[in-house]
Image: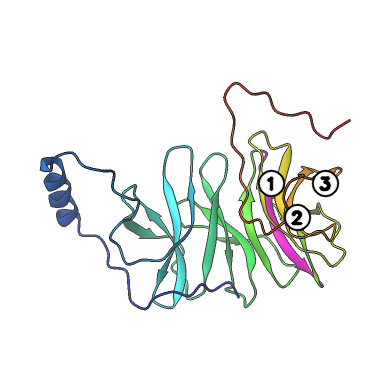
Amino acid sequence: DLTPTLPKGKIKKPDPKAAEAKATDAKAEPPGPPVPFAAGKDLQFRGCAQNGRGELVATINDGDQADIWTIDWSGQPNRNLTNHPSNDLSPSFSPDGEYITFVSDRTGEPQVYFMSADGSGTKRLTFAGNYNADPDWGPDGKIAYSGQRGNALDVLTVTMHGKMQRLTPGLGRRSLEPTWSPDGRRLIYVSNEDGKGHRLWITAADGAAREAIEGPFGQFYTPSWQRMPGKKPRSWPRP
């Protein structure tokens, strides 16, 4: 079930005059500790994404449905981009920031879609499987996601033209939450494909080589990449 447990109620549209007055008052206040992102707002945020221009979108509940909204850096929702009676979740920007991929259950089952960054031109990308989730738009234009085929959850990719490729072998296992490396050559994801618990794995962008990251066994969630200043990327796959 993609639908998160969310509070009732509607999100009020921001009042520009009130926001301007609030900003003026904030300038007059003495310096203090940093204000937490989206502090003081009784909202459910889920799946925030940022493009290269610093623009933010996030999944926010509006009553009983989840939509994708633009938000500012104070956490204030500005515009509902999807505004659909379904649940629209997990946004991810294209490399140029002009498009957003996301998951929606508007056809009854979670599938991967994309739209322009202004919310127009929504197009469905996946038509196979009864559960597709966790899309991440890579540097080369491919969207990685996890998709259910039978009893297995695999890591797959799909292009804006709908060309799909499976990267993991299935075998009744669960591989999910794929995330592209900054150079687009690899993906990190969570999987129990070797039967040793859900741990982190790396796969080549074409699925030709895969390798588990050695470390403590346990439950891992939501992996991501980070460039380390002064350190060279490790050679992979290993010789």
Relative to 153, residue 17 above or below: above
Residue furthest out toward the top? 230
Q: Can residue 188 be seen in this view?
A: yes
* Residue 142 on image: x %, y %: 69, 46
When asked about the image quadrant of residue 42, the answer is: bottom left
Q: Which amino acid does label 3 sit on?
A: Gly
Reply yes or no: does residue 147 show up in magenta.
Answer: yes
Reply yes or no: does residue 82 show up in magenta.
Answer: no
Q: Which amino acid does label 1 sit on?
A: Lys
Magenta segment:
140-150
Magenta residues, dominant SS class: strand
Question: Mark 1 or 2 closer to N-term?
Answer: 1
Residue drawn at x 86%, y 57% as measured from the top left: 169
The reply to whether the C-beta atoms of the residues labelled 1 and 3 are less than 8 Å apart is no
122 or 183, which lies in front?
183
- In terms of secondary structure, where does tag 3 sit? loop
- In terms of secondary structure, where does tag 2 sit? strand
36 or 216, which lies in front?
216
* Residue 217 on image: x %, y %: 73, 54
Check disc 2 and report the residue beneath it.
Answer: 156
Relative to 81, residue 20 above or below: above
Q: What residue type is labelled 2?
A: Leu
Q: How crowded is mark 3: few (under 14 residues within 10 Å), some or many (20 or more)?
A: some
Q: Quadrant of the C terminus?
A: top right
The reply to whether the C-beta atoms of the residues labelled 1 and 2 are less than 8 Å apart is no
Question: Mark 1 or 3 closer to N-term?
Answer: 1
Disc number placed over residue 142 in the picture, else none: 1
Residue drawn at x 15%, y 51% as measured from the top left: 22
Check disc 3 and report the residue beneath it.
Answer: 207
* Residue 100 on image: x %, y %: 54, 52
